[in-house]
Structures are given as structure tokens and as C-alpha cells.
Image: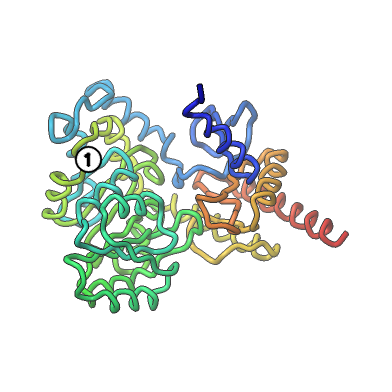
Amino acid sequence: MSDPLGWLEEERSAWTQAGRLRRLVVRQGSPAPRARLDGREYVHFGSNDYLGLASHPQVVEAACEAARREGWGAGASPLVIGHHREHQLLEEALARFEQTDAAVVFPSGYAANVGTITALVGRQDAVFSDQYNHASLIDGMRLSRAQVFVYRHGDVHHLETLLREHAGRFRRRLIATDGVFSMHGDLAPLPELVRLARHYDCMLLVDEAHGTGVLGPQGRGAAEHLGVHGEVPIHLGTLSKALGSQGGFVAGSEELVLHLVNRARSLVFSTAMPPASAAAARAALELVEKEPERRQKLLHLAGELRRQLQDQGWNVPPGVTPIVPVFVGTEQRVLELAGELRRRGLWVPAIRPPSVPEGQCCLRISLSAQHTPEQVHQLAQALAELRCAGEGASAS
């Protein structure tokens, strides 16, 4: 009798051969830059806890206090009885922070993207998507059954060509983009996207997952950093990166939020996030507003590291974010480099397809305000040595 799951072994073998098989890494300790991974201590550069708030005493205590008072699980979906007072308080705080009329929280950032896109567009509609958008945006587009047009990464001229070609063909049109692209660490051309959305009568959705708390004078993200925050009608964000908690959110008009509460399936049919997670996120949001020096230190560290690696000759694109990718090309090369860094006590994720396109494997360095200048220098020095060793091997 044949095994109906027998194909899994063949699939695993193919992924292993291609250098793309992944396994779960077991971490012990908080998301701080020094932790035990698979039983060994490393300085790690793989966390999205950009501001170091996941282990901040004020955030931890807010979660503990809410758990003692409310219990842990929400107990139901939001529209039944799962919407706790902590969720409401967080939504009010997010709306104030984002300077919008309202906000709504989702169980995850992924759920926020999938639920929002599928609630806004359908078969009669079109979505215009940046080539390097996050998987959660792409999956939302696919599930919506809208027609999807992909424009070249950051290429507003290509986008305008597509908008012009398909004018008048659809009921509604949506431009969707990351604010900060998660693998490349660069910014979407948001001022130009705002202009195009207005000119061609499109909705504009910006996912600020990697910008919230990090960019802009008040930490509102890439749109604020680029001066167009108030001109973006649909702001998405996550609570699980710079805010150090769990969940996602959408901020915008009262009508938008009411529509999502009724039509976003990932909200309607999911148990609400734990109230304690909402309390932790609200405490983190207060710290973002009160302690701008956290993001200032973070961006300074990122700028210094980016400059040093570029000076060493690595393929590091320009940018202003704490995501510093080192593009090396092949799966074999990126795995070799990540292995050499681990031998030096440094953990840097090796990013391979499908997270990046073919030929764009990279070391994705993710910095935190908790990293010290000495730790960043240690990483830069290690990469300098590996660069020299690689050049020597090529010459021989």
C-alpha cells in the first residue's frame, strides 16, 4: 500500500539539495541581543525587536498585570465577547498615535494584511503591488480574487503605466505596498504613490510593519519619515516588532474600521489576541512616544554599520533603516558566511528563496537599540575578515 504522504521525503530531499531546507532554532532567554540559540550563546542580529521593548520592565509588568486581572486568553472572537477593555484602550491609543479617527487590532500583522485586502477588493477590482511586497500582502491579494498587477520594485513610472493602461476597467483599485521592505530594508516611494493614488482615484494601503516605532519624528513610520503620513488613508502595522508584543492593527477612518470589523474574515473568525498582549503593546507605545532616543540610537548604529560594510566592499544597498542586508548571491555562499559567523559567536540569519528572489540570497542583519557599539563593531570586524578571506580564496 503506497504512502499518500510519501512525496514529502522527496520534497525535503530537493530542498536540502538546493540549500533551502530550514529547521526551527530553539532560543532561551529574552529577545535581547545576547541569547542561547540551540544551546550555545550568541550575539544575535536576527530579531525584529528594534527598540528592545519586548523585555522592557514596563512592558512586561503591563502584560503581567493584565493577565492577573483579565486572564490570558481572550476567550472568543471580537464580535462575540472576545473584545476586552484592553483591546479598546489599545485601539484608542493607536488612533491617537497614528492621528486617525479609529483603529482596530488583529491577532497578527499577517492577519491584518490578509483581512484588510480581502475586505476591500474582490473579483471586480484590481490591486497594484510592488514586486517585493511581503508575503502577507501577496496572500491577501490572491485570496481577494482581485486582478493583481505587479510593478517593478519602487518603479513609479512602471506603476503609472499600469494604472493608465487599466483605467476604467475595474470597480475599485488599490495600491498596496510595504513602507519598509523587510528583506532589502529600503523605503517605498510614498510621496509619489500618494500622488498617483490621488490622480488615478485609487485606495492606498501602506504596511508599516518595519517602520512603526522606528522611523519619523514621532515614530509613526516610513510615511511620516517621508512627510506624507496624513495623506495615507490605510495604515497597517504590527505590534510584534518595535512594539515588542504580538498582533497587528489597521488605522484609518471610522468607516474603514467599521467595515473591517464586519468584513475582515481574519478578524471576524479568529479568537482575539490575548488582553495581556494588548496591554503590553500599549505600554510599549507609551515608551515610543516618551523615549525618542531609542530610535535615534538604533538608526545611528545602523548607519555606522551600513557605512562600514559598504567601505569593506560588500553589496549593501543604501538605506536609513535598522535592516542591513548583505547580498551575496547563492545559497551556498550565504550558508557558508552564516556558518563562519556562528563559529565566531555571531548569529545572522541566512535568507534564501522563497524569502528573496533567486540569486539574491543575503545575510539579513537586524539591529536593535539594545545592541552596543562594541557588538556592532565585532560583527563588522568579523565580516571584514571574511571578506578578506574570500578575496584571498578567489585569488588563489
- Left or right: 260 as drawn, with respect to 238: left
Residue 293: where, in percent of width, then height? 43, 52
Residue at mark 1 = 267
Q: Name above or below for residue 87 compared with residue 167.
A: above
- Left or right: 77 as drawn, with respect to 142: left
- Left or right: 65 as drawn, with respect to 42: left
Q: Name above or below for residue 236 compared with residue 151.
A: above
Say which quadrant the C terminus sits in.
bottom right
Residue 77, located in which quarter of the rendered image?
top left
Report if residue 230 is visible in the image.
no
> Residue farthest to the front?
1
Residue 148, located in which quarter of the rendered image?
bottom left
Q: Secondary structure at mark 1?
A: helix
Residue found 57% across the figure and 49% down from its top: 352
Q: Nearer the viewer, residue 184 or 380?
A: 184
Decide: few, some or many residues near mark 1? Use Cα within 10 Å; few <14, some 14-19, many ≥20: many
Report if residue 226 is visible in the image.
yes
Residue 91: where, in percent of width, then height? 20, 44
Residue found 39% across the figure and 40% down from its top: 244
> Residue farthest to the right?
396
Residue 357: where, in percent of width, then height? 53, 57
Residue found 60% across the figure and 51% down from its top: 363
Callout 1 amino acid: Leu
- Left or right: 335 as drawn, with respect to 85: right
Q: Nearer the viewer, residue 200 or 258?
A: 200
